[in-house]
Amino acid sequence: MLSLEVRIMKTKWKNASSVELNGENQQNANSFCEVITVLGGRRPRSTPNTDSGMWAHSMTVQDYQDLIDRGWRRSGKYVYKPVMNQTCCPQYTIRCRPLQFQPSKSHKKVLKKMLKFLAKGEIPKGSCKDEPMDSTVDDAVVGDFALINKLDIQCDLKTLSDDLKESLESEGKNSKKEEPHELLQSQDFVGEKLASGEPSHSVKVHTVPKPGKGADLSKPPCRKAKEIRKERKRLKLMQQNPAGEHEGFQAQGQPPSLFPAKAKSNQPKALEDLIFESLPENASHKLEVRVVRSSPPSSQFKATLLESYQVYKRYQMVIHKNSPDTPTESQVRLVPVSFEDPEFKSSFSQSFSLYVKYQVAIHQDPPDECGKTEAETPPNGPDCGYGSFHQQYWLDGKIIAVGVIDILPNCVSSVYLYYDPDYSFLSLGVYSALREIAFTRQLHEKTSQLSYYYMGFYIHSCPKMKYKGQYRPSDLLCPETYVWVPIEQCLPSLENSKYCRFNQDPEAVDEDRSTEPDRLQVFHKRAIMPYRVYKKHQKDPSEEAAVLQYASLVGQKCSERMLLFRN
């Protein structure tokens, strides 16, 4: 059976998690030795060989939340964790902080491009071959350690005043000349345009560079006409209101700004304002985003499954160059298979019996209650509940893109995106990420602890994965202590070494490390037992090594909650 046929088996987000170790392609002799017997499948080809993996017969949202906070990731029902110090390209879990997120210039360009297309039907010139990484390099550098190369230049009053006068005169003969008002010197003159928190050392530059060696730093930099007009307007306001110069104080005890504080109307627009900007009544197109539950599947999901699959098939053929007969409907790895599928029925019966036995023995649920497949909708959770969802993008009544997401107790986790290649010019990879960030902020209003957006893995040495670092502020997960560290603090280390321990405290350890492996829960021969009982009947030393490795990878909490299936 093909690997993709294994991965699409439906994940039940219920009250118990049951997993089975998978060790195929493991190079370490002490790695997981059991190959899945219920599904009879292989490791997905999309996952690296140097990883630790297991098949999840069922998985609760809390268990998966704790697993991804330890560096795990799912591909369908296969859950895997890269061996960070062995792989050639370490994969660090990355999360964005949506509550503090501000879109970059390139993000705004993508949103404006979508609005122009919806309003007027404008199609941008040129191709989007770099989808979804069409953010500029400048945006990736903003807030980075590379900013240490920028200087904050202090100009004396005479130089600044003369330059401003010359700039205004050069704007055009018909422009009205303004006499510049006497201005206060401020070391924040240039530094206010840099990212907050950067050092601001004022220096005077008098050295004139040799011809061909770059700009003359002894002269103020050239400015756009728009900036000059803004300066002229602010100077005029200051002349009309002499007390206005005191409005430039940013905080008590800090030096005043060069110009009065901007009005609130000039503050950067919020992400939601950019996304949901009003369109004219005669707009050329209509875009609607629907969130439908995929596991357990809702009626809306079932009704749109075929159309969603057609988009996925085209995406696989055009973007990933798959042959037309490769992505069959039963192989769509992120779409649940039909309940009538024979393979699903044969494997589900054993998986379901395991689930029922666990619920009756551990949670004392009545047997007739265990057959109900319901979404996890706690009263303090989001209105849509927790679990797996498809975020469908409908353009003029048809699906053009689908974002696969998991809504978990603390985050929205982005799993996958596929789209109609005919609409690549809309940069749907970036656009969908911005919509998912906005969606996370929306869920946070109802569920305060749900405040992060997980983007999968960040690979610093891979340009196609490095773009995720452009969604700021963001954090990377330390691969040894499993604490989150701001990405700005991680980048200098990653420039020197592919594998890094981000936690700078040498005494810090994994707080959820496995300290009591005997409390690990095992399902063996239709019986649930702690590991201390199970190991008494085992004589194979490799079995103990495999189970203990599993415990160390999932952590103490998950090892006590999840059932490890052993044949």
Image (cartoon, rainbow, N blue to C red):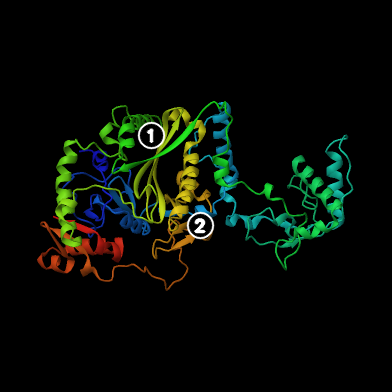
In the rendered structure, the answer to whether residue 563 lies left or right of residue 150 reads left
Residue at 67% from the left image edge and 55% from the top image edge: 150
Whether residue 535 sits left or right of residue 23 in the image: it is left
Specify the amino acid type for callout 1: His
Tell me whether the residue at label 1 lies in contact with that at label 2, contact meaning CB atoms closer than 8 angstroms.
no
The quadrant the N terminus occupies is top left
**Circle 1 or circle 2, nearest the eye:** 2
Q: Is residue 542 visible?
A: no
> Which residue is the site of mark 2?
487
Residue 456 sits above or below residue 246 on the image: above
- Residue 320: assigned label: 1
Counting from the top left corner in percent of width and height, residue 337 is at 25, 38
Q: Position of residue 480 (x, y in %)?
A: 38, 64
Q: Residues within 10 Å of mark 1 (few under 14, many from 20)?
A: few
Residue 266, image x, y percentages: 68, 47
Q: Give above or below for 502 relative to 456.
A: below
